Amino acid sequence: MFLITFVHEMAHLTTYNVYKHKVEPHGKQWKSAFRELMDPFLKQEIFPGGLRELLENYMMNPSATKCSDPELFKALKSFDEQNHFLFLETLPEGCQFKIKGYANVFVKGKKLRKTYLCSMQDSKRSFRVSALAEVQQVSLF
């Protein structure tokens, strides 16, 4: 993930050097620079398995974040060191969970589009949580 993020940021620098603040941060000029900078890495076939194909598809119209492409995001996360976190989308509705890095307990609610409407267990406040949020199921015991 580091390489992709690094090239993403280099595309910002390249775009800024040419256009300064006259273009959108993730506009067509940035997309063009990002594709151009990623192309040598895709041609060298340094990415394992199906990751290269997912990246090639993503690079057709790259967005501000890898998270916008769920399949690419999951494939990239599969190379992380094993941890005890799951994606929220894998838990059943009504399940209690904690979001990685937070102490609050939430209850998974109905699926909206790319998010779930979840409620904080203590306050009952509702939040939209990404289906790809890394969570840990809370034991009922």
Image (tube, rainbow, N blue to C red):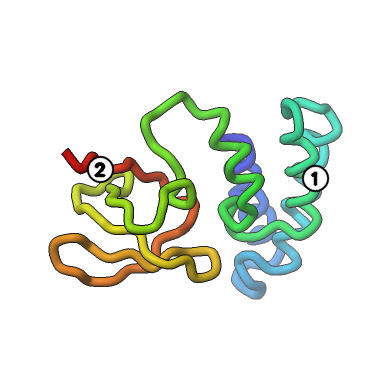
- Marks counted in the figure total 2
**Residue 16 appears at what percent x and percent y?**
64, 61
**Image: 46 above or below 33:** above
The answer to whether 101 appears left or right of 76 in the picture is left
The residue nearer to you, when weighing 27 against 82, is 82
Of circles 2 and 1, the one toward us is 2
Q: Earlier in the sequence, mark 2 or mark 1?
A: 1
At 81% from the left and 27% from the top, the residue drawn is: 45
**Residue 102 appears at what percent x and percent y?**
24, 48
- Judged from this view, the residue extending furthest toward the bottom is 22
**Image: 80 above or below 24:** above
**Residue 29 appears at what percent x and percent y?**
74, 65
At 22% from the left and 53% from the top, the residue drawn is: 105
Query: Can you identify the residue that label 1 sits on?
Result: 56
Q: What amino acid is found at the position of numbered circle 2 in the picture?
A: Val
**Image: 17 above or below 138:** below
Instruction: Work out how far the residue at label 2 is from the one at label 1, CA to CA, in angstroms.
Output: 37 Å
Q: Quadrant of the C terminus?
A: top left
| Location of residue 56 (image quadrant) | top right
Q: Which mark is residue 87?
A: none
**Image: 8 above or below 62:** above
Q: What amino acid is found at the position of numbered circle 1 in the picture?
A: Glu
Q: What kind of element bears circle 1?
A: helix
**Residue 74 appears at what percent x and percent y?**
58, 42
| Location of residue 73 (image quadrant) | top right
Query: Can you identify the residue that label 2 sits on?
Result: 138
The answer to whether 67 appears left or right of 39 in the picture is left
The answer to whether 133 appears left or right of 73 in the picture is left
